[in-house]
Amino acid sequence: MISGGGPLGSPGAALVSNSRILNNCNEEDGGGMWLGASNAAIRDCVLSGNLGERGSAIEIRDAWGESHPLIQRCLITGNGSPSTLDGGAIYIAAVEARIESCTISGNWALVGGGIFADGFESENTSAWSFAVP
């Protein structure tokens, strides 16, 4: 279980698997996990109760657009708050991310309660977006 700050990924190909990333907070982006210029794989994880301004569970960002992270078979639920700007669950910017066989539900943000994305592919993923009025 990862709690109280969440992992930070930089260039490379980290693997996070069979983990619980719970109740982390960041006043800026990536409350549960922040990946920058990373080809990380996140598999078989639960991300819940995380808070961040963007990407409360996960933020993935690459200024050069060369990252290809994978999120696979994860449960991402109960992340974000009414003050989360974009991506209650996941915020993706300038990245070709793949999200496969995940359940993304019950997350909150002003825009993109489930996923706020620029450059995104998905397969067999149940994703719902909930906007805060």
Image (cartoon, rainbow, N blue to C red):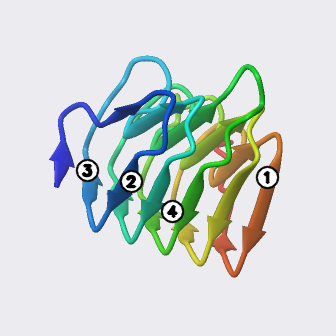
Whether 123 is drawn above or below 12: the answer is below
Asked whether the beta carbons under mark 2 and mark 1 sit within 8 Å of each other, the answer is no
Seen in the image, is 28 located left or right of residue 22? right
Q: Which residue is mark 3?
A: 22
Location of the C terminus (image quadrant):
top right
Amino acid carrying mark 1 in the image: Phe
Q: Which residue is mark 1?
A: 120
Amino acid carrying mark 3 in the image: Leu
Q: Which residue is mark 2?
A: 15
Q: Which residue is mark 4?
A: 106
Q: Residues within 10 Å of mark 1 (few under 14, many from 20)?
A: some
Seen in the image, is 5 located left or right of residue 55? left
Q: Residue at x 52, y 36 (%)?
A: 82
Labels 2 and 1: the sequence-earlier one: 2
Q: Closer to us: mark 4 or mark 2?
A: 2
- Residue 89, percent across and down? 54, 49
* Secondary structure type for disc 2: strand
Residue placed most toward the observer, 132 or 111: 111
Q: Residue at x 28, y 51 (%)?
A: 21
Q: Quadrant of residue 61?
A: top right
Seen in the image, is 110 located left or right of residue 53? right
Mark pair 2, 1: CA separation: 20 Å
Residue placed most toward the observer, 3 or 107: 3
Mark pair 4, 1: CA separation: 20 Å
Q: Closer to us: mark 4 or mark 1?
A: 1
Mark pair 3, 4: CA separation: 15 Å
Mark pair 4, 2: CA separation: 25 Å
